[in-house]
């Protein structure tokens, strides 16, 4: 079987980009070769380069921390190297220290992204690029697949006033790009101006879903359990901006949603009645073991994606929240606590990248009217991203 | 398991930014093909490649049976013209094996070779050997060779029959693979290039949407023409890996009827007795019904042949090679005085036709000496599992899509899909 070779393997085959260099590595446990060997171990054994520092993104370098849990500096058990956290107490802790970078020749970034605007690894990458540019250090991004393919785009482009760590740049919700492509895009379009070298994968094609790559799925973060989680995530992450449970504290985060005060049978019936493409809803009860509604039985639905090529995850998520809210507007509320270092704007607005969605829901408006407005900006984005794409051929072996 | 499959030709035509297109644009190519190779939009590959300006100009290299597939097997064909602009060079001029390779000057006269041939998944079928010969020629003259891949009509999972032993190499068995090899033609090219040290600058333009478990009728591709004069339809490809062995006997494989390979018979056979004896064996996925036919040419031309019709009842358990071996043994046992092996020259090989087809001397020995057929088959097929494991390294396609999800509708690597879909 033809496996996709991640950028890490391509670099190990031809390590010239890091030859003779002192390197730092931004990574977590999910950065493995196709036969499960980890980036830290592979890059530690330097044949003419030296690994001198490690940096961990949100959830830590071994991915053990929950969401929005601050990570402290630790020592890596394998190499004895210090691990610098890129997810600390405040916004300034999200970027690596410039002095630290100055001791390096190159900062290597190997992070598995999952193709949604909310997922923070791409912004950790961007902040690293910005600081590395200031420190005069090269950045080498080792590319990995977009698990939900590179063909499908969806959602509104984030508005400027809703910039946050879950949406640092104006991207559509589902951007259809790989981390390496985004690095190229960010570097020019958002003027990060770093000395960037992307090591592309071998054998990846835009139409591939994770299952087509032959690579093992390693949870890139604690609640990204399977590729199905990644499939529904562009929409279901919106539930984080409400007082509904997104299924955190169960084995199916983001595939379940509900609340103690919801009637699962009515909710499923209403959602199925919308005839959203490629998805069916099944009534479901679940009991979160931590996080929202911990220890309380929640009534809700499980999403069953029946056709992932037609499935519209973001639109589906928008409708899920709206329909649940309309069933009990008294009990429903938006999340009002601090969210990803932001207190002055609501989480739902940061996630949706706009206040339009909240306003539509609160005024009983039609979500699909907003959905219909995106087409032009999506086409514009598709054009803008075009020159930064790395995988254009149907046969990368040629 | 059904899905929309795009052949390598479709992918090439529909993807202007394809790397192969970048190379071929404006170039003169030799298109190794025959008249049965069409794009999904019903255009013949020659016309479509020129209309879409995939290449600058082209010359056709025609395989066995000639470009127009008008020749019978082992009939040589001559150079001719497709139209005013396109010349057809025959790679099967007949007379001797010398003419199975393209002439060096013809290869040197082009910038690249492009192979677009519908193979049918059996070692006897000579298109892959023509391709291999072109690969050797391309390597020698330092021209790149592109293979536009097409489905294996009898799926890419099942393999059957033993490997070919070296003394029995011929144009109907040029490499050590099982009779039913489970490769696509693009995969064969990759396998040969690596394992035969051909050193050809090879590029396979892969299909889109094909999975190994697919049979031809799962691909939504039309069987547009007989791929060769006696391969009229997909059903024939299912029985061919076994029934072609009758070419090595004096029993008619129903050549000279409209259903070659799907029936067998001879004037001296008793149809009812043969059908009864074969059905009694309870071979998987197949039933035999008494059948009589009068071949219009070839063996027993215009004589009434009595025999059986081979009705495949479950193609997923049907074993075409094994089935044919049992039928040959049964025919021979029913008419030991009349049955004989073919003793005339066959595909310019040095051995008897049946040995060349089987790729071994052991089957003929087993039948002639009345040995246990089951033992022969077991020994013969013993190395095949290991062979397939090694060959799978050259596979380009997965067995099936992820279990619980539908097969990919035609999503291309170069399109952008914006949700929600318009309307």
Image (cartoon, rainbow, N blue to C red):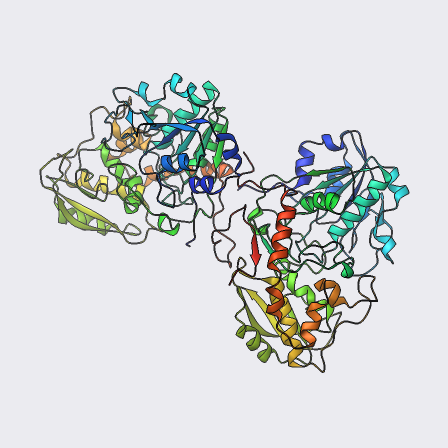
Could you tell me if residue A343 is visible in this image?
Answer: yes
**Looking at the image, is B331 positioned above or below residue B362?**
below
Q: Quadrant of residue A272?
A: bottom right
Name the side, left or right, on which A173 lies relative to A69: left
Is B188 rendered above or below residue B309? above
In the rendered image, the residue lying farthest to the top is: B105
Q: Position of residue A176 (x, y in %)?
A: 62, 51
Residue occupying image coordinates x 80% and y 65%: A339
- Locate the N terminus of chain B and report the quarter of the image it occupies: bottom left
Q: A261 or A12: which is nearer to us?
A: A261
Specify the farthest residue to the right.
Answer: A99
**With A320 as the anchor, is B4 left or right in this view?**
left
User: In this rendering, would A57 be left or right of B154?
Assistant: right
Q: Position of residue B88 (x, y in %)?
A: 32, 26
| Residue A274 screen position, x and y as percent | 54, 72
Along the viewing direction, whichever of A387 and A263 lies nearer the viewer: A387
Number of marks in the rendered image: 0
Residue drawn at 78 percent across, 68 percent down: A346
Q: Position of residue B33 (x, y in %)?
A: 35, 32
Q: Is residue A67 visible?
A: no
């Amino acid at each position: 079987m033809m496996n996709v070779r991640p950028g890490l393997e391509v670099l190990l085959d031809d390590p010239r980009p890091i030859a003779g260099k002192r390197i730092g590595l931004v990574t977590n446990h999910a950065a493995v070769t196709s036969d499960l060997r980890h980036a830290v171990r592979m890059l530690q054994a330097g044949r003419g380069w030296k690994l001198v520092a490690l940096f961990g993104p949100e959830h830590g370098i071994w991915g053990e921390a929950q969401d929005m849990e601050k990570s402290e500096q630790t020592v890596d058990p394998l190499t004895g190297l210090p691990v610098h956290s890129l997810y600390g107490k405040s916004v300034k802790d999200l970027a690596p220290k410039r002095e630290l970078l100055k001791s390096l020749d190159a900062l290597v970034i190997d992070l598995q992204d999952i193709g949604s605007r909310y997922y923070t690894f791409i912004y950790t990458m961007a902040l690293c690029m910005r600081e590395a540019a200031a420190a005069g250090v090269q950045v080498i991004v080792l590319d990995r697949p977009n698990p939900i393919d590179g063909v499908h785009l969806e959602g509104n482009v984030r508005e400027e006033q809703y910039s946050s760590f879950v949406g640092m740049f104006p991207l559509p919700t589902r951007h259809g790009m790989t981390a390496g492509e985004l690095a190229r895009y960010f570097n020019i379009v958002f003027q990060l101006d770093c000395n960037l070298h992307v090591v592309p994968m071998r054998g990846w094609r835009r139409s591939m879903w994770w299952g087509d790559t032959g690579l093992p799925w390693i949870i890139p973060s604690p609640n990204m359990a399977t590729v199905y989680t990644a499939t529904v995530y562009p929409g279901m992450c919106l539930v984080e901006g409400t007082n509904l449970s997104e299924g955190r504290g169960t084995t199916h985060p983001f595939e379940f949603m509900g609340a103690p005060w919801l009637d699962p049978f009515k909710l499923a019936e209403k959602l199925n009645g919308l005839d959203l493409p490629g998805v069916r809803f099944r009534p479901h009860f679940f009991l979160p073991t931590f996080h929202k509604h911990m220890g309380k039985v929640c009534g809700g639905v499980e999403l069953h994606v029946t056709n992932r090529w037609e499935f519209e995850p973001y639109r589906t998520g928008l409708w899920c929240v709206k329909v649940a809210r309309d069933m009990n507007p008294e009990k429903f509320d938006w999340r009002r606590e601090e969210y990803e270092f932001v207190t002055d704007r609501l989480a739902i607005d940061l996630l949706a990248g706009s206040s339009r969605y909240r306003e539509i829901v609160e005024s009983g408006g039609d979500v699909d009217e907003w959905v219909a407005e995106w087409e032009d900006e999506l086409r514009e984005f598709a054009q803008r991203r075009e020159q930064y794409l790395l995988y254009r051929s149907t046969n990368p072996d040629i | 398991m059904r899905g929309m499959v795009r052949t390598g030709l479709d992918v090439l035509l529909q993807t202007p930014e394809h790397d192969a297109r970048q190379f071929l644009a404006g170039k003169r190519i030799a298109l190794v093909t025959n008249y049965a190779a069409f794009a999904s939009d019903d255009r013949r590959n020659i016309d479509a490649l020129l209309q879409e300006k995939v290449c600058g100009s082209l010359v056709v290299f025609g395989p066995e049976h000639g470009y127009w597939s008008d020749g019978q097997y082992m009939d040589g064909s001559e150079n001719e013209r497709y139209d005013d602009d396109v010349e057809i060079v025959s790679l099967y001029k007949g007379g001797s094996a010398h003419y199975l390779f393209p002439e060096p000057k013809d290869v040197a006269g082009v910038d690249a070779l492009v192979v677009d041939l519908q193979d049918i998944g059996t070692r006897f079928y000579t298109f892959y050997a023509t391709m291999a010969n072109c690969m050797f020629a391309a390597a020698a003259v330092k021209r790149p060779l592109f293979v536009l891949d097409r489905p294996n009509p009898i799926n890419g999972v099942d393999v059957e029959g033993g490997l070919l032993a070296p003394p029995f190499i011929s144009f109907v068995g040029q490499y050590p693979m099982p009779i039913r090899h489970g490769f696509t033609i693009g995969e064969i090219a990759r396998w040969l290039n690596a394992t035969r040290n051909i050193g050809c600058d090879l590029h396979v333009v892969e299909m889109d949407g094909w999975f190994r478990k697919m049979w031809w009728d799962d691909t939504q591709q039309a069987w547009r023409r007989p791929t060769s004069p006696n391969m009229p339809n997909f059903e024939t490809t299912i029985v061919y890996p076994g029934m072609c062995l009758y070419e090595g006997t004096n029993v008619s494989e129903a050549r000279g009827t409209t259903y070659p390979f799907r029936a067998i018979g001879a004037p001296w056979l008793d149809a009812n007795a043969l059908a009864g004896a074969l059905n009694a064996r309870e071979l998987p996925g197949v039933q035999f019904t008494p059948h009589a036919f009068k071949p219009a040419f070839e063996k027993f031309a215009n004589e009434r042949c009595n025999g059986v019709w081979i009705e495949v009842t479950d193609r997923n358990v049907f074993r075409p090679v094994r089935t044919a071996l049992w039928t040959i043994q049964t025919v021979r046992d029913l008419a030991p005085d009349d049955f004989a092996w073919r003793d005339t020259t066959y595909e310019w090989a040095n051995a008897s036709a049946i040995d060349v087809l089987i790729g071994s001397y052991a089957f003929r020995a087993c039948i002639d000496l009345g040995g246990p057929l089951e033992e022969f088959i077991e020994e013969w097929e013993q190395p095949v599992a290991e062979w397939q494991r090694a060959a799978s390294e050259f596979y380009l396609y997965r067995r099936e899509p992820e279990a619980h999800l539908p097969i990919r509708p035609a999503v291309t690597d170069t399109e952008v899909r914006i949700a929600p879909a318009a309307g």
